[in-house]
Amino acid sequence: MWLLQLPSKLSTPFLNGHAHGYNLLSKPNSGVARPQWAPPSSVPQIKAMKTMQGKVVCSSSDKTVAVEVVRVAVHPKYKRRFRKKKKYQAHDPDNQFKVGDIVQLQKTRPISKTKTFLALPAPQRPSVQPSQPEELAIPFESQPQP
């Protein structure tokens, strides 16, 4: 990194943002030194839209699947909800997904020009089974009690 380092005789106050002896964030005429603002160290990282869920619509390429993600948006003028569809190219290293599978897309480093997602199996939703009618705990009068 020798290109980024300047010799000490070529250093200039403009490199650090200090010109004419004052800080660019403070008032130029103030002679009082003010503490610099620093972002808090415990700020959580925002992870918006890192994972999405969609349906595989094409799996003919090697190690690549096309996934269609459907989301609901509100029209700005008419305030009506409508569906927006978008297709993403996702990396499928084992070629395990077929057309119609539900997958979860996880954001990763760019794998190619169009692939920045990794296709993972979607977590299974608990299915609602129709339950058998259970016996009532109240015995009929004709039934003997145990």
Image (cartoon, rainbow, N blue to C red):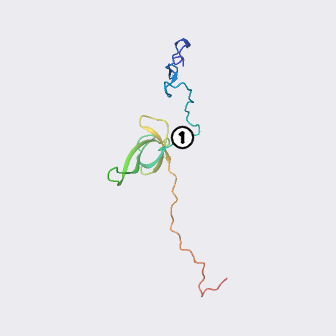
Does residue 64 lie above or below 126 as drawn?
Answer: above
Q: Residues within 10 Å of mark 1 (few under 14, many from 20)?
A: few
Q: Give coordinates of residue 125: x percent, y percent.
A: 51, 57
Does residue 4 lie above or below 87 as drawn?
Answer: above
Kind of residue indicated by mark 1:
Gln
Count of labels in the image:
1
Quarter containing the N terminus: top right
The residue that disc 1 covers is 45
Quarter containing the C terminus: bottom right
Q: Residue at x 50, y 50 (%)?
A: 122
Q: Give coordinates of residue 112: x percent, y percent.
A: 44, 34
Q: Residue furthest right?
A: 146
Does residue 138 lie above or below 29 as drawn?
Answer: below
Q: Give coordinates of residue 142: x percent, y percent.
A: 60, 88
Q: Is residue 134 left or right of residue 73?
A: right
Does residue 122 lie above or below 44 as drawn?
Answer: below
Q: Is residue 70 left or right of residue 15?
A: left
Q: Residue furthest top?
A: 9
Instruction: Give the camera-side residue of 31 and 73.
Output: 31
Asked which secondary structure carries label 1, the reply is loop
Instruction: Give the camera-side residue of 7 and 92.
Output: 7
Instruction: Give the camera-side residue of 124 and 45.
Output: 45
Instruction: Give the camera-side residue of 36 and 85.
Output: 36
